[in-house]
Image (cartoon, rainbow, N blue to C red):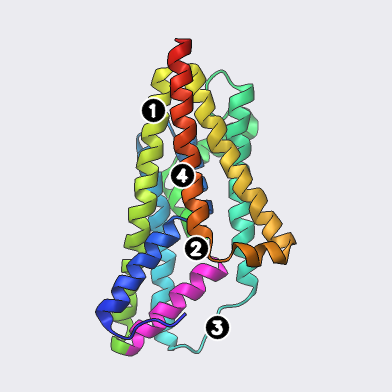
């Protein structure tokens, strides 16, 4: 991908890249799962912001590092497997915990020894921040950050590269922050409407996490599927948002009829 050399044009492109990156299905599904698990805690509505801050902190560190070494470092290929494995692990964990809450809990919150253990440790803004940072240690994110950082550093040194990293993070904050606020609001409304609606929203969030994780594993197992999915991350993210919104509208209508 060729980036413009004009500083303002580059900045606009980087912000748009950050916004599009925030629409990645693994971002959205993870934020949804973290928000559901922490639904009864004050910071739940900020899970998207915290996730993006952790993700963006790594991007800014990469920008600073790339501008310092001036393009002499190449992104190692093993990061692709590490990043995919990290996202699959957390998506599977969040999906299992939320589905466990649906079928084995009176209230739609994680229970059981493992569920309580993870929920207790996930009940911290710092953990959500850390999960966002771990998601950034991937081939796609690092190579993208390295590209715009190198372009910016050639125009004005490390200050420009760091500023571009900040712009990229701002784009993600916009997308993922709004998603976290939106999901938190849907969950609160579901909890207030009826037990059925609350369980249904948890089912959708958990299932979405598992579906995205399974698709990630299939991409690793079948290279043809990975090639087919290239350039479709925005469409997948929008599809996930539409799925959550549609299921919310449906469950609210059913819950009102039941009550």
Between 205 and 43, the one lying in front of the other is 205
Q: Position of residue 9 (x, y in %)?
A: 28, 78
Residue 198, horizontal then vertical, whole percent: 48, 24
How many angstroms separate mark 2 from mark 1 (CA)?
A: 29 Å
Q: Which mark is residue 8?
A: none
Residue at point 47% right, 35% down? 246
The residue at 38%/26% (across/down) is 189
Disc 4/disc 3 C-alpha distance (Å): 35 Å
List the residue tagged with mark 1.
188
**Within 10 angstroms of label 3, few (less than 14), some, or many (20 or more) residues?**
few
Q: Is residue 44 left or right of residue 142?
A: left
Which residue is under mark 3? 74
Looking at the rendered structure, the secondary structure element under dot 2 is helix
Q: Nearer the viewer, mark 3 or mark 1?
A: 1
Residue 141 counted in the magenta span: yes
Counting residues from the start of the chain, the first of labels 2 and 3 encountered is 3
Gap in angstroms between the C-alphas marked 3 and 1: 45 Å
Structural distance between the alpha carbons of marks 4 and 2: 21 Å
Main structural element of the magenta stretch: helix, strand or loop?
A: helix
């Amino acid at each position: 991908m060729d980036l413009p050399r004009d500083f303002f044009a580059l900045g606009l492109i980087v912000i748009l890249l950050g916004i599009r990156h925030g629409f990645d299905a693994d971002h959205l599904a993870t934020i949804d799962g973290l928000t559901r698990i922490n639904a009864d805690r004050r910071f739940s509505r900020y899970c998207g912001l915290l996730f993006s801050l952790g993700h963006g902190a790594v991007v800014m560190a990469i920008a600073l590092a790339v501008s310092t070494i001036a393009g002499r470092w190449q992104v190692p290929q093993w990061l692709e497997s590490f990043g995919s494995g990290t996202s699959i692990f957390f998506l599977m964990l969040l999906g299992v915990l939320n589905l466990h809450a649906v079928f084995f809990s009176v209230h739609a919150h994680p229970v059981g020894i493992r569920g309580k253990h993870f929920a207790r440790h996930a009940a911290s803004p710092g953990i959500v921040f850390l999960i966002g940072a771990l998601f950034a240690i991937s081939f796609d994110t690092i190579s993208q950050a390295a590209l715009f950082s190198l372009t910016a550093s050639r125009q004005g040194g490390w200050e420009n590269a760091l500023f571009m990293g900040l712009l990229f993070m701002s784009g993600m904050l916009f997308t993922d922050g709004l998603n976290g606020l939106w999901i938190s609001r849907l969950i609160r409304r579901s909890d207030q409407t009826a037990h059925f609606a609350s369980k249904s929203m948890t089912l959708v969030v958990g299932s979405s996490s598992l579906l995205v994780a399974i698709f990630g594993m299939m991409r690793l197992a079948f290279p043809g599927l990975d090639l087919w999915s290239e350039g479709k991350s925005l469409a997948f993210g929008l599809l996930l948002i539409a799925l959550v919104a549609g299921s919310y509208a449906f469950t609210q209508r059913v819950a009102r009829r039941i009550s």
